[in-house]
Image (cartoon, rainbow, N blue to C red):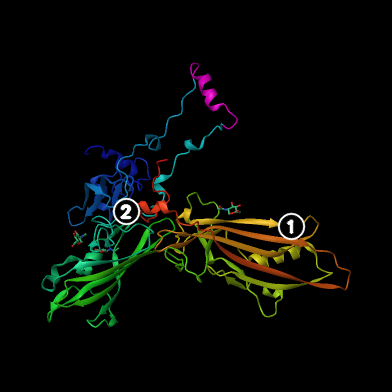
Amino acid sequence: IPGNTWMLFRLCVCDLLVAQCDTNCCCDPDCSAEDFSLFTTCSIPVVMGDSQLCSQKAAVYSLDVEANPPERIFKIIDQVNPSIFCIHATNYEQALYFKSPEIPTAENFDELLDKFGGATFSAEPDSWNLDTDAQNPPEYGVPVQTEDAFLRLPSPVVSSWCSDANPAGFLVNQATKCIRSVSVEKCDSIQALSMLFYINSSILSVFQVNITVQSIVVQSVNGMRTLLSSSEALRLPMVLDGLCINAVLGVNYHITHTDTGEIIEAAAAFVLGAISREALSIEQSFEISFTQENTQPVPLSGNPGYVVGLPVRAGFQPQGYPSPAAFLSNKHSQLTILHSTSTQDCLAAQGARAPVLFGYNMISGCKLRITAAMTCQPLAQTLLDVLKGQSFPEFVASFGNSQAQDVLDWVPITQLHISEQSSCQIPVSLGIEIKWTKYGSLVNPQARIVNVTATITSSTLKQLPSGRERIIPVTSSVVFTDISSPAEPSYKAWPTINIKLPFDFFYPFV
Ligand SMILES: *[C@@H]1O[C@H](CO)[C@@H](O)[C@H](O)[C@H]1NC(C)=O
Ligand SMILES: *[C@@H]1O[C@H](CO)[C@@H](O)[C@H](O)[C@H]1NC(C)=O
Ligand SMILES: *[C@@H]1O[C@H](CO)[C@@H](O)[C@H](O)[C@H]1NC(C)=O
């Protein structure tokens, strides 16, 4: 085995049985040529270390089913990470190894006692628990791997010309536009104009996933678009009547993954068009979106910053999810308040909610008829439900396009309670304050939510004499406050790059 690639065998995640060959596990060192001849596929086609490294060795496995008997093919390749942000060398050694705990002896006992004898020392420090790294889903932003390299999302990198070196990052929804130079005569030999270029290499996830053609829309020279009825057929670019037809003008990838991060489906929707002889270049547009299976895509409320009038997005952290966690969103993924109704009856208003819209200060309310027969506790709970709704979210998205996986993009809602001292308190108002700032360049500032507080105010319910009743108002309100500080002139002297790195980009570095 060349070089230090022996360690790749330790990363063979399908090798589950000790000293036995696991079916279709092509990296399992326990399998013999005889075993391989019975395999139908390689369940793990590529084995490599940390995908954030700039370059590393990767082991690639496949089956030659044509051979007699069928055999396993094994190659070591140099895997190059095309991202401009990659780890050149891991220089934080402690992060790579588990230290063996020191065995106490007569000589080192006092020293160990000094170190670990404090009140906070527990018998089983967290670091002794072996990590289950191998089962961790691929992380946000990690390039989506294909048979030949990475799924490309052509984009204007240094100029407006398309660069094919831009990898699509896992879970990163993106849209790009760039310019391609063309010549009608050579139209059929320009790879980037051919549908094949965008789908010929299948995606490597837990299993190999082919990219299917979802739809083809053909655009005529005058801009009219027609959806082709049969989408299966590949249409390759060719010269016809002095035009280059079937040239790719746009590709829209749609990737479906499971909750553990396994890619299970990849589809591409194409826009093809004709290029006239005079054209020296065309603009192509590309898009990629990721959807978790069995979930509805959550509409954005701005990209990246919030747009005034669109719903404020909200969600929860699922119970028992390890950190960093994905934030599941509530049913509508929105922050909502009580919806005023014409009857204004609080008990009838239960369940009617209105979305909080970015930038709109809102007040809503209802009236509660209190009779002597009402008891404190159930009434207090009912009113809390009226004010907060069935499931009040714990987090609000700081950007209109915040991704569920991007933990730092979610602002916790601070919940405050104002009440008097008395035996019976009922909630009578909910006040939500949303503080936001302008973020990014001065030319095109983006609205970003930085702090949300939800304050419940309660007041004392006095026991009424029997037969009497009283009507009290219950209100909820939302106030948006811009807390942007005036731009500091000193920024102007520095070139700035407006990008957001994945929150865990520098992991395992401190
Ligand atoms: C896909 O097409 C590109 C460009 O034509 C080529 O470089 C690559 O090797 C192809 N990949 C496969 C798996 O055929
Ligand atoms: C993927 O495409 C290849 C080549 O066209 C084909 O042989 C294979 O059966 C396909 N795999 C799946 C799962 O559809
Ligand atoms: C938001 O502001 C409130 C009141 O100023 C503060 O108590 C809370 O910690 C802040 N929340 C965050 C996430 O900064």
Q: Residue furthest left?
A: 185
Is the residue at mark 1 in contact range of ligand 3, meaning its CB lies under 8 Å from it?
no
Which one is in front, 433 or 8?
A: 433
Which one is in front, 421 or 145?
A: 421
Residue 373 appears in the picture as rendered:
yes
Residue 443, image x, y percentages? 39, 63
Q: In the picture, residue 188 is in which quadrant?
A: bottom left
463 lies left or right of 456: right
Is the residue at mark 2 in contact range of ligand 2, meaning its CB lies under 8 Å from it?
no
Residue 173, image x, y percentages? 38, 62
* Residue on which disc 1 sits: 419
- Dot 1: what SS? loop
Task: Please say if 343 is above or below 258.
Answer: below
468 lies left or right of 204: right
328 lies left or right of 210: right
Q: Residue furthest top?
A: 107
Give the residues drawn in magenta, as a range: 105-120
Q: CA gap, disc 2 to disc 1?
A: 60 Å
- Count of numbered marks: 2
Residue 149, image x, y percentages? 25, 55
Disc 2 crowd, CA 10 A, few/some/many (<14, 14-19, 20+):
many
Q: Write the residue at 17% across / 54% down.
A: 67
Amino acid at circle 1: Ser
**Residue 32 lies in magenta, yes or no?**
no
Quadrant of ligand 2 in image: bottom left
Amino acid at circle 2: Ser
